Image: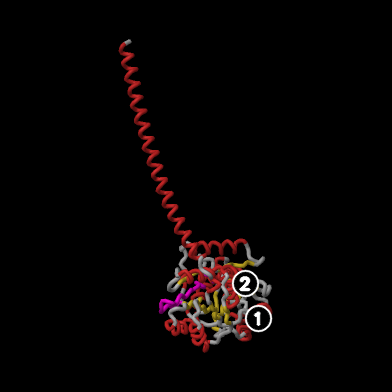
Amino acid sequence: MKKVVSILLCLMLVGTLMGCSSSESSSSSEEGTAEEGAAEESASDEGSSEEASEDESKSDIDYSSLKIALILPGSIDDQSWNASNNAGAVACDEQLGTKIEVIESVAVEDFESTFTEYGEKNYDLVMAAGSQFDEACAAVAPQYPDTVYTVVNGTASDSDNMVPVFPKEYEGSYLAGILAGYCTENGQFATMGGEMNTAMVHLLDTYEKAAVDVAEERGIKDASATRSDLNTWTDVSTAKSMTEQMIDNGADTVFCYSNEATSGSIQATEEMGAKFIGFAANKNTESDCVYASVDMNWADVYPWIIEGVATGELKGAQEVGVKEGVFAVVYSDECSDECKEAVEKAIDEISDGSLDLTQYFSD
């Protein structure tokens, strides 16, 4: 009996000690959790404070007081590059309260004098839409350090006040090429550009690569693309006659990126019963021959540019593309689900970096 009592007492003692140990451990754990929670809350508060500070700095800016000019090489009614950039300026005025002065159809020989004029007027920001403005901007910008010069589709950044924003058009044209690959019946593609500068060559390289690859995947043999330099952004008749010639030579799917001149290409495509892939603007409503379009969504990008320049966050050369939402694919009823899925897959791959399109550049 004494042995039983002794055993019971030992068991009770062990239980008591274990209970104390458990209680102390629980207390320590709770204290540690509380300390970790406090640290996380503090870090969260700091992050929120920084974000709030950034938002406040943006909201403190009186965008309506900024003097901003946008110089365009063509008409805002071109239903292409100039119209898309003008839409970006309109979006800024609506969203930020800016009052952007838009100067249309500025001739090449007037680029430098126009940049100079707005530098002399002490404008806060002078924007120009097109890589053709790079050289003139580099010549004038250093003379007016208090004015920021931004060439949309430009790359030159030779002084601190030059902030070019280059849209990776070759990403958008790759999506257009996928559309063309699903559109074609014979695998023969006609591609035309207003000027064969580096940006144009690269975007046609990726377009043609995607178009030919998709056509071959669909079982079309000997798919190929024929390229032509129109050497004009505005001559409708030149684009029309060149398109007619290329369709006569067998092309059934046409791609033309040449601002106002593009309308001539669409006319010829419609009249000759071929199909057209729109680029830089939504061409779907222009003609039934348009299979689909890849629109440039400057309405989202322009406010980002203005805010970044105004706050000083944007400095030096910038690039934007598919990941930043610059390109919007506008499908027609002719586009199959398979086509749409292929385009969306490419968007994901370009965005996450798993598809490097520079490998397709010819130079």
Residue 190 makes an appearance in the image: no
- Mark 2 = which residue? 282
Q: CA distance from mark 2 to mark 1?
A: 18 Å
Part of the protein shown in magenta: 155-172
**Looking at the image, which is closer to me, 7 or 115?**
115
> Where, quadrant-wise, is the N terminus in this rendering?
top left
Q: Compare residues 294 and 159 and report the one nearer the observer.
A: 159
Whether 135 is drawn above or below 52: the answer is below
Q: Residue placed at 56% from the left, 82% from the top?
A: 73
Does the magenta-highlighted stretch encompass residue 112? no
Residue 214 screen position, x and y as percent = 55, 67
Residue drawn at (54%, 83%) of the image: 229
Residue appearing at x 60%, y 61% in the figure: 338
- Whether residue 350 sits left or right of residue 90 in the image: it is left
Which quarter of the figure has residue 337? bottom right
165 in magenta = yes
For marks 2 and 1, the one nearer the N-term is 1
Dot 1 amino acid type: Ala
Majority secondary structure of magenta residues: loop
Q: Position of residue 239 (x, y in %)?
A: 61, 83
Could you tell me residue 43's position as x and y percent? Answer: 41, 52
Q: Amino acid at mark 2?
A: Asn
Label 1 Cα crowd, 10 Å radius (few <14 / some 14-19 / many 20+): many
